[in-house]
Amino acid sequence: MSTRRDAVHDTLRRSEGFRSAQDVYTEMRQHGAKIGLTTVYRALQALADGGQVDVLRTDDGESVYRACASGDHHHHLVCRRCGHTVEVAGPAVERWAEAVGGEHGFTEITHTVEVFGTCASCSAAVRAG
Amino acid sequence: MSTRRDAVHDTLRRSEGFRSAQDVYTEMRQHGAKIGLTTVYRALQALADGGQVDVLRTDDGESVYRACASGDHHHHLVCRRCGHTVEVAGPAVERWAEAVGGEHGFTEITHTVEVFGTCASCSAAVRAG
DNA sequence: GGAGATTTTGACAACCATTTTCATTTTGCC
DNA sequence: GGCAAAATGAAAATGGTTGTCAAAATCTCC
């Protein structure tokens, strides 16, 4: 029974950028979906575990989710003004993380990398304003 | 009046790796310090704002703090079992982040990179256990 | 040195995202 | 249909963090 989970996934796919669990819940309710907040959280966790969505923490500790285009490992380039997100591959970073971990005797290396910046249109907006 | 803030900073400096606000508070109380949890949080925030401590979020959303050895930009290699932390420089990553941002028209690039792994002694402990 | 203004402190309550509980509903299976 | 297992969701609990506000410490100007 994964109807609810699919609905959550669909909602996420229709969204641009990252959305919080609460956002997803609110949006689904507004569209008339009968779903509980608990179920949204559970669906989001399941999807994240399955690698179908990306999770990251905002600076204020809220988890935000995004349907990712590919199931492959990748990182994000996020505009700090408008939230526009680009998925980027970073083989160089993968190798670096492994190497750095290995140098210090660490095993089972994982890493989180997020790149923030101001996107072209926001830069333009700032200069204009 | 920054006695409390210095005390918090000192406690952090005496610690290895990242500690949560609650950890710092507990430790200070155990050492006989008269300080409130609220003040610890405020001190930690002030120190973080001033760049004297590093802040990062654990996977479960808790903020953890560490007195950083240098004011220079650096990253962390954190043992996911014991919390042991190594500061690592990553010129390759810096360059990669800049390049990736530039490719997509982003400016004012910043980035967060955290590498997690299991350190040598914890790996040994796991194998032994 | 002192009165009053200002800042800092901290006990406690409030917040709020997330998780747990548990009774109810739905689904899979025969 | 009927029963067991899984899913659901409302409400309550959790727990880190922040806000409140009165008391205490510190500063300032005289």
Image (tube, coloured by chain):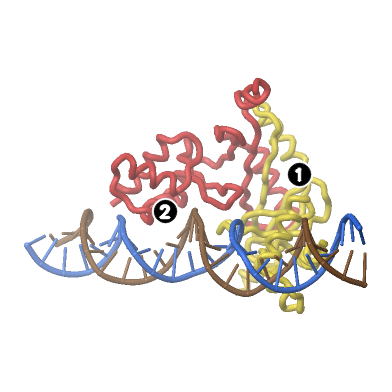
Chain colours: A red, B yellow, C brown, D blue
Q: Is residue A8 left or right of residue A90?
A: left
Residue in front for this viewpoint, A67 or C22: C22
- Residue A90: give x, y in percent of width and height: 63, 37
The residue at the point 62 percent across, 69 percent down is B127
Question: Residue B56's image quarter?
Answer: bottom right
> Label 1: which residue?
B90
Above/below status of B60 relative to A96: below
Residue in front for this viewpoint, A92 or A38: A38
Q: Are marks 2 and 1 on the same chain?
A: no
Above/below status of A13 relative to A129: below
The residue at the point 66 percent across, 31 percent down is B101
| Type of the residue with mark 1 | Gly
Q: In this view, does A18 lie to the left or right of B39?
A: left
Question: Residue A93's image quarter?
Answer: top right
> Label 2: which residue?
A41
| Type of the residue with mark 2 | Tyr
Q: In this view, does A38 lie to the left or right of B40?
A: left
- Please identify the residue farthest to the top as the structure is shown: A128
Q: Mark 1 lies on which chain?
A: B
Question: Residue B58's image quarter?
Answer: bottom right
Q: Which chain carries label 2?
A: A
Q: Tell me the element at label 2.
A: helix
The residue at the point 34 percent across, 41 percent down is A30
The residue at the point 38 percent across, 53 percent down is A37
